[in-house]
Image: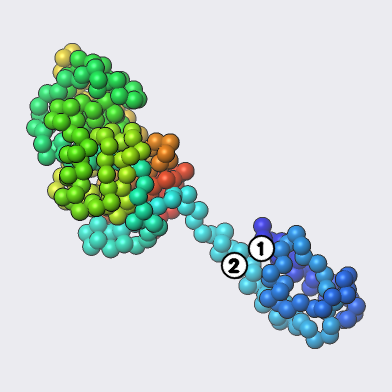
Amino acid sequence: MKFQGLLLAFVILISIFLTTPRGQISLLQARAPTVSQLKAQSAENFQFFTIPEGTFSMSVLETTVGNLATSSKENAAQPKISAQIFLVKFLNSNTTLKQLKSQDRWPIASLTKLMTALIAVEKIDLDSEIELSKKAVESEGTIGDFESGEIYKARDLLKAMLVLSSNDAAAALAESIGIDKFAMDKRAAELGMEDTNFNDPTGLSYLNQSTANDLSKLVDYIYFHHPEIFDFTKEKTISILELGKGQTKILNSVNEFSGQPNFLGGKTGFIDESKGNLISLFNDSFGRGPILIIVLGSEDRFGDTLWLLPK
């Protein structure tokens, strides 16, 4: 609006300049402003001044108006990123393309489940059977429609945790091998995540905090050492089998990117304290390897990610 108001003021000024004898344009009988002074005037406060002969030339006015129009278009074209923190990098070369406050700590919400998943695949036989406890199914949220006493293979609970972001599944996996904040903090330290701490395996607590830089270390390790974790999250729809009754559940991903050809996997996260968080991996169309995009504290995490994705 500032640029539009200023442009309108210049147009009116030019019109008066062309139709009125020089030296007679005066509302306040003030000294003629310079171009820089005119730029400083807001649209609301703009007033007309006496323009003595020779103060302005048409070329100066035309150039100024043209520059303002160009500047206005450039500002309109700039992406409006709502994320408080973001990081874009090539995973293979560890080359950062864009970043904003990537060293700042932020509540990571269900991005926590990537660490839970890593410890689970390292410590649990994924073909082992796990019975859901009452405590596990009483975790906040009902995604997955799990019930106490149901039995699943660890692999299927891992799928539900990553694809649906099920807190019940995360709690069940954690209970089965004793995943807690101490084990998670220890594993983070081993990965060099120096600005990260965990409070629970689900991400429900705002005390689960990290930085985009630290999260990129976690993603890097998972992608190159346990790619199956991200492979689960690529799918739009998955199925899991409840072994007790032999019933199959069809689960739809909560990630809008799942199922897209260039999507290599990722994880969503949201609590009130964090707003929208999102980790995404995309295949680069120019063959430069996987592209990692992390957005934290976003009002539109999927939209922000698309803005940041190199074209």
What residue is shown at x 30% (from left), y 31% (from top)? 164
Quarter-of-image position of residue 75: bottom right
Query: Residue 91, how many percent across, how many down?
Result: 25, 57
Three-letter amino acid code at disc 1?
Phe
Residue 31 placement, left or right of 200? right
User: What is the distance, in whole Å, between disc 2 and disc 1 at their CAs?
Assistant: 8 Å
Q: Earlier in the sequence, mark 2 or mark 1?
A: 1
Q: Which residue is mark 1?
A: 3
Label 2 Cα crowd, 10 Å radius (few <14 / some 14-19 / many 20+): few
Q: Is there any visible trace of residue 31 in the rendered image?
A: yes
Query: Residue 270, how many percent across, how many down?
Result: 38, 37
Quarter-of-image position of residue 272: top left
Compared to residue 308, the image places residue 65 above or below, namely below
Label 1 Cα crowd, 10 Å radius (few <14 / some 14-19 / many 20+): some
Compared to residue 28, the image places residue 112 above or below, namely above
Three-letter amino acid code at disc 2?
Ser
Query: Residue 159, how many percent across, how many down?
Result: 22, 32
Query: Residue 297, how many percent across, how many down?
Result: 42, 45
What residue is shown at x 75% (from left), y 69% (from top)? 10
Where does the C terminus fall, quadrant-wise? bottom left
What residue is shown at x 44% (from left), y 49% (from top)? 83
- For numbered disc 1, what is the local secondary structure? helix
- Residue at the bottom extreme of this rendering: 54
Q: Which residue is mark 2?
A: 71
- For numbered disc 2, what is the local secondary structure? helix
Disc 2, disc 1: CB below 8 Å?
yes
What residue is shown at x 26% (from left), y 40% (from top)? 198
